[in-house]
Image (cartoon, rainbow, N blue to C red):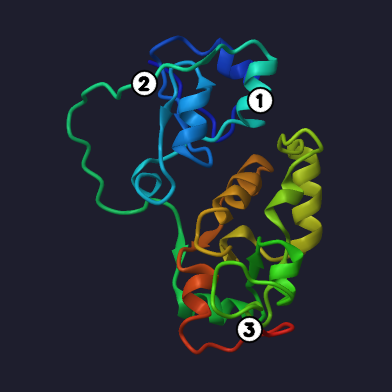
Amino acid sequence: MQQPLPPIIGPKELLLLPKGGYILIDAGPSRERYNDTHLQGALYADLNADLAQVPPDPKDGGMQAAQKEGFAASHAIETPKGREDYTFLNWQLPTADMDGAATAAAGGESIVIDVRDKERFAGITEPVDPIAGHIPGAINIPFASNLDADGKFLSPELLREKYVAALGNIPTGNVIVHCGSGVTACHTLLALELAGLGIPALYVGSWSEWSRNGKPIAGNIK
């Protein structure tokens, strides 16, 4: 029986996987970039049109790291192979709604982590949503801080040290993570899992929902 893939794999591990034993998905910035070059055999998934329906297994370091380790690049446009229907009823990991995020951010035994960059959290800038700022009581740990200078995830030991210091005695089951629209927050969910702390709840609506519903807002509001 084939062992399940870990939540995060590096380029060396990717090269060792048996051909045909996995599906490689390119969720890069545009189809134009994919058409120009991509890892051999990779299928393209568009963030807005496809990604919500494609359960990704992220690869540590991205395309450049895989190419550096010798994974072949390609210009060929890959076509998905036909498969039997897959019934998907609901998200299998913990989630939180707007009321749950408000309760957790109020303090006590729970905490809300906002993974957007510091300027968006502070309300200095907001390139996507109509109002800048953050959920009152939330803490800011930008998802990019999970990575080293080469764009790879920090070691499990460093990630654990970082998040244990941030969370204190609050268990992961009492943690809610959000971003702008529920996508990059998953990066931190994976970082916490890699650290051996388990996967916290994802606030799917994230700042896009919160900022449009008359909720309290903290920061240098614009």
Q: Amino acid at mark 2?
A: Glu
Residue 59 locus on image (x, y percent): 58, 31
Q: Secondary structure at mark 1?
A: helix
Q: Secondary structure at mark 2?
A: loop
Please identify the quadrant where the C terminus is shown: bottom right
- Report the number of discs: 3
Given contact means CB atoms under 8 Å apart, are the residues at marks 3 and 1 in contact? Answer: no
- 47 relative to 165 in the view: left or right: left
Q: Of the numbered discs in the image, which one, if any, rests on residue 78?
A: 2
- Residue 67 sits above or below residue 151 on the image: above
Residue 38 locus on image (x, y percent): 52, 23
Quadrant in which residue 154 is drawn = top right
Quadrant in which residue 179 is drawn = bottom right
Which circle's residue, 1 or 2, is located before the other in the chain?
Answer: 1
- The residue identified by callout 1 is 64
Q: Secondary structure at mark 3?
A: loop
Separation of residues labelled 1 and 2 (CA atoms): 19 Å
Q: Residue at x 69, y 69 (%)?
A: 120
Nearest to the eye among marks 3 and 1: give it: 1
Quadrant in which residue 62 is drawn = top right
Q: Amino acid at mark 1?
A: Gln
- The residue identified by callout 3 is 106
